[in-house]
Image (cartoon, grey):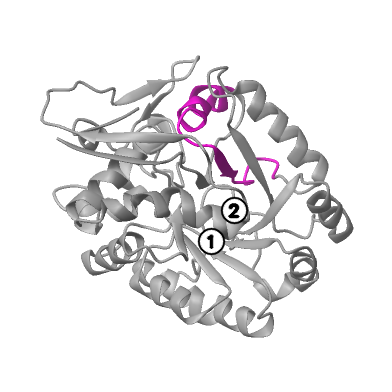
Amino acid sequence: MTSVVIPQPDDWHVHLRNDEMLDAVVGYTARRFRYAMVMPNLLPPIVSTESAAHYRDQILAAAPNDAPDFSPVMAVYCSPLVDPNDLRAGIEQGVIAAVKYYPAGATTNSELGGTSLNDFAHLFEVLIATGSRLLVHAEATDPSIDIFDREAAFLTDQLAPLCDRFPELAVTVEHVSTRAGVDFVAAHPQAAATITPHHLARERSDLLANGMKPDLYCKPVINSADDRNALVTAATSGNPDFMLGTDSAPHPTTAKYGPTAKAGVFNAAYGLEVVADVFSVAGALDNLGAFVSGNGCAIYGVDTPETTITLTSESVDVEVATSLATTSGDEVVLFGAEEATRWTVT
């Protein structure tokens, strides 16, 4: 039996959706994580202090009563609809913590995103003045670029010049998926990165070999074995620039299984078990607490928790759920069920 005690973790990138999907999924995050950076790509998107506060209230109302310490952290969607004065006010009031940039058309509900980071310098100046962060979905949308090269292309063509232009701007490269992303963070002192459980635990052969697996389809796509190795090395090293962001993103099977699969992996239920398994295989369980709790606390300037959780691995037969259902009957597949048969969380 292997057991490790870590500070209660935080999730610095999660999609909680709204309406009945929010009701169905929020408990999986709230019962595991203390802070959760909630992504703003709803329809309509979260673009103001008022809409961020309203969405936060909806999340807390939907959260289970047995998760009293759960705190949603709100980001706004980087778009021309964001007023810089309102953004500053929302940050100063403690409602808004970050701005999230989506390249237009890159992923779910990104149609209102930007075509160039340079168009939003007026918002980045507010972030610098208030000590807040820019969160970036780093993915080129040019169809002539191979899908497995789009993170590297975006980092080179857009984010690197922005970091040179605004060296004081704190940036989080979200759901980094390649060795190029890891190298980018190492080369830019103002940059940090989130890494997801599915990018740590799977590579593109898992996605594509022996038939396409729509439940593993996400944006950015799961990349090569070499890229996965780079992510595992970065996450397990104790490097303070890398932190857990699950990018848990629920879609019903009706949207995943069809001619076109929606991008997203729902891993909130078993993401910690998946990460623990990766760290155990790497012989790095001593660094698990830093990755899932300590590093993010330092990056976002919050106190480390006094509470802890225990992850235990032992050879027992455990039956775990593989899906959930919304009140209307939509099914969502749970990622990480295999790892959840090897690890328990208390």
**What's the amino acid at mark 2?**
Ser
Q: Residues within 10 Å of mark 1 (few under 14, many from 20)?
A: many
**What's the amino acid at mark 1?**
His
Q: Quadrant of residue 253?
A: top left
Inspect the magenta stretch and tell me whether residue 27 lies in it.
yes
Inspect the magenta stretch and tell me whether residue 212 lies in it.
no
In contact (CB < 8 Å): disc 1 and disc 2: yes
Q: Regarding mark 1 in the picture, which secondary structure is present there? A: loop
View extreme (front): residue? 306
**251 sits to left or right of 5:** right
Q: Quadrant of residue 268?
A: top left
Viewer-proximal residue among 113 and 312:
312
Q: Regarding mark 2 in the picture, which secondary structure is present there? A: loop
Viewer-proximal residue among 53 and 233:
233
Residue under label 1, please give it: 137
> Could you give the CA–CA distance between mark 1 and mark 2, rounded to whole angstroms?
10 Å
Residue under label 2, please give it: 110
Viewer-proximal residue among 134 and 276:
276
Which span of residues is magenta-colored?
20-45
Q: Position of residue 136 (x, y in %)?
A: 57, 63
**166 sits to left or right of 67:** right
Instruction: Relative to 283, say whether 63 is above or below.
Output: above
* Residue drawn at (78%, 63%) of the image: 130
**24 sits to left or right of 208:** right
Front: mark 1 or 2: 1
Q: Quadrant of residue 228?
A: bottom left
Question: In the picture, which quadrant includes the C terminus?
Answer: top left
Q: Earlier in the sequence, mark 1 or mark 2?
A: 2
